[in-house]
Amino acid sequence: MDNFKCKNCSNPCKIFECLQNDLDLDKEDLRDDMVKSIYHKAEEISEVTVSKNSSKQYMLDTRLDNLFTSKFTGYPIMFILLGLIFWITIAGANVPSSILADMFFFIEDKITNVFMYLNAPNWLHGILVLGVYRTLAWVVSVMLPPMAIFFPCFTLLEDLGYLPRVAFNLDRLFKKAGAHGKQALTMTMGFGCNAAGIIACRIIDSPRERLIAMITNNFVPCNGRFPTLIMISSIFIGAVVSSTYSSLFASFFVAFLVVIGILITLLVSWGLSKTMLKGVPSSFTLELPSYRKPKIGHIIYTSLIDRTIFVLSRAIVVAIPAGLVTWILANINVGDQSILALFASNLDPFARLIGLDGFILMAFILGLPANEIVLPILIMSYMSEGAMLELDSLQAMGDLFRANGWTTLTALNVMLFSLLHFPCGTTLWTMKKECGSVKWTMVATLIPTTIAIITCFIVTQVAHILF
């Protein structure tokens, strides 16, 4: 390579192509070789010219990187850390959720007394208290504790400098899928919020690779879907083993679902890069930051203010009209059925094919504004009175679902559908703003929805054949 000389070219791109043809190398191999060569040369220069004040810290970083980014230990450690975070979340959220539920429904009784004292009409009490207030109470009491535990744990990993190592580990896989390595970074942003993940795709220069990252960002569960996955896994998957290990088993099952989401991301990225968005993946160099002591103040502010309060406030803003509309749909009858039940009965035959029921499918459709409200809508839909139950525990929620015909297979399909289905309204709106295309926004809606339906259909039919 040192002796190569392109006499006829002055353009760097042409020189690159001539070099590639002259050496008969694959584009990716040549690019990788050049990057490795530059990196090793920089390392040699650094060792000779740079003096390190803290050699112990440098050695510690090197040893930790050898462990966290190893081909053999990197992925198992990622899976175990994710499972431990979910376990801490599941084990720690039950008691505060129950306390919050008791407090909110105590307040509801007082509000109801005020309505009775004022002799307010039943429909007004139904809309404002049984519709709007109960939805808000449920969203806050069930969502706040898991988020208040999950986000600090996740932010701690981020503050320690571990998340860039996750991106480093996944970079090779994204490259093989025909996508950009930076997609791993945008994907980790999607764990917080898919809309934020899509905005983060701006760091990818190539329009083709940026579109792939946007379309597939939805396959990692966001804040709005984690509570659904965690709660249903706690109720049904955890019940498969003895109570001693139920929380741990449910936690690692959620981590397993996240791995499925990542695999689907890679598979769809590969499919898009070979069909609708053909092209050669561009390379990039990821500089791993040093490990650092976590800043407690920063973790508390970021996890509680920037994430927990932000997500919860968004859920509340969406839950108010959603609770009102859902209560109206559940309490206005056409013939002998409510409007909600009528829609659900029409959806039921198709929903049964994919292991769900009409009410579950209806809840996902009505939950388009925000994934956080899917479970509240579903619970309200199952109520014969057309209002939400005063659920004070996961046990009460499990009893309600089982009374409406849920099995472990139903729970599995609900979790898969929640993981893979269409993005929420905020994410779609962000996608449209970022890519400026209705066509690609529709593609980002149809691909995950189709995959969710096909996956649930296969799981259901295979389960029926085997059992």
Image (spheres, rainbow, N blue to C red):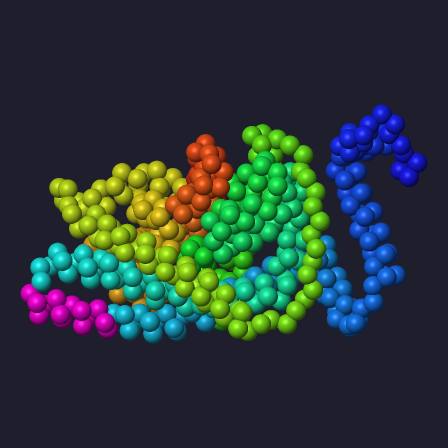
- Give percent across and percent down for residue 203: 59, 47
The foreground one among 104 and 263 is: 104
Which residue is at 90% across, 34% downward? 4
Q: Is residue 357 something that shows in the picture? A: no
The residue lying toward the viewer, choosing from 339 and 358, is 339
Looking at this view, name the residue that lies furthest to the top. 8
Q: Nearer the viewer, residue 20 or 10?
A: 10
Quarter of the image holding residue 386?
A: bottom left
Residue 291 visible, this angle:
yes
Kindly give the residue lying farthest to the left in the view shown. Answer: 119
- Residue 243 image point, x, y percent: 46, 69
Question: Up-down: is 90 above or below 2?
Answer: below
Residue 150: x percent and y percent? 49, 65
Residue at x 81% of width, y 30% of height: 10
Magenta stretch?
Answer: 106-119
Q: Eyeballing the image, is 18 above or below 342?
A: above
Choose top left, top right, bottom left or bottom right for residue 176: top right
Image quarter in which the N terminus is found = top right
What percent of the width, then of the height, locates residue 385?
Answer: 18, 56
Q: Quadrant of residue 354?
A: top left
Extreme-front residue of the structure: 10
Task: Name the main secondary structure of what is drawn in magenta.
Answer: helix
* Residue 117 lies in the magenta stretch: yes
Question: Which residue is located at x 67 percent, y 42 percent?
Answer: 175
Residue 285 in magenta stretch: no
